[in-house]
Image: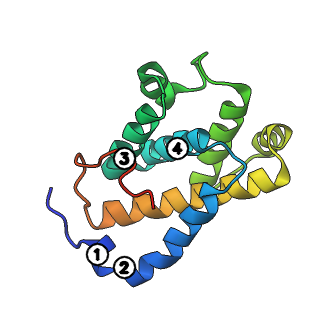
């Protein structure tokens, strides 16, 4: 697959707003490892190879196990995820697929504060946007190095 446009270079001015969301989320009370787990799951749903490469590497660098990464697509059946992670994953899937049921929201609200729910929503919106950019412009996957974009 060949890149259509190097959006991150040619669209640098447009990306400033997205980078601001990343800076905001870096200070979130939601655990960074959990945010990366959500980024990975949402990227699975959207089929974004670039983001799957990036977040799998960042998760492994942060100590995530291979087992939990391999099972993420079937997290409901796995026993290796906490209740907090399960609530976040269900919420992320709902936001990504455009429907958060009352049950999913209530479960998430039991695990997260209102501020954390706001931050989770912003994180999910952000990764969905990155997925769509990378898919639209066919950003090549495979060369990402863990922590490459940390400021």
Which element is circle 2 on? helix
Query: Which residue position holds label 1?
Result: 9
Marks 2 and 3, how far apart at CA: 19 Å
Which element is circle 4 on? helix
Query: Which residue position holds label 3?
Result: 54
- Closer to us: 126 or 9: 9
- Closer to us: 96 or 13: 13
Q: Residues within 10 Å of mark 1 (few under 14, many from 20)?
A: few
Q: Residues within 10 Å of mark 2 (few under 14, many from 20)?
A: few
Where in the figure is residue 59, as x and y percent of width and height? 46, 36
In the rendered image, the vertical position of residue 78 relative to residue 58, given as above or below: above
Q: Residues within 10 Å of mark 4 (few under 14, many from 20)?
A: some
Judged from this view, the residue extending furthest toward the bottom is 13
Q: Residues within 10 Å of mark 3 (few under 14, many from 20)?
A: many
Query: Which residue position holds label 2?
Result: 12
Do callouts 3 and 4 mark residues in contact (Cβ within 8 Å)?
no
Which element is circle 1 on? helix
Where in the figure is residue 32, as x and y percent of width and height? 59, 44
First in sequence, mark 1 or 3: give its number.
1
Identity of the residue drawn at 47% across and 77% down? 16
First in sequence, mark 1 or 4: give its number.
1
In the rendered image, the vertical position of residue 1 relative to residue 11, given as above or below: above
Identity of the residue drawn at 30% across and 46% down? 145
Judged from this view, the residue extending furthest toward the front is 151
Query: Which residue position holds label 4?
Result: 36
Judged from this view, the residue extending furthest toward the left is 2
């Amino acid at each position: 697959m060949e890149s259509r446009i190097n959006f991150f270079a040619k669209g640098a001015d447009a990306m400033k707003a997205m980078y601001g969301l990343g800076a905001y989320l870096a200070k979130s009370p939601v655990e960074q490892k959990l945010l990366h787990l959500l980024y990975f799951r949402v990227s699975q749903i959207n089929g974004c190879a670039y983001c799957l490469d990036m977040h799998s590497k960042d998760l492994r660098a942060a100590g995530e196990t291979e087992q939990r990464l391999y099972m993420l697509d079937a997290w409901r059946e796995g026993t290796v995820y906490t209740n907090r992670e399960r609530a976040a994953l269900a919420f992320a899937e709902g936001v990504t697929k455009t429907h958060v049921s009352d049950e999913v929201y209530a479960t998430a609200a039991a695990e997260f504060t209102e501020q954390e729910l706001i931050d989770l929503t912003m994180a999910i919106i952000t990764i969905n946007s990155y997925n769509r950019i990378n898919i639209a412009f066919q950003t090549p996957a495979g060369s990402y190095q863990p922590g490459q974009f940390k400021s």
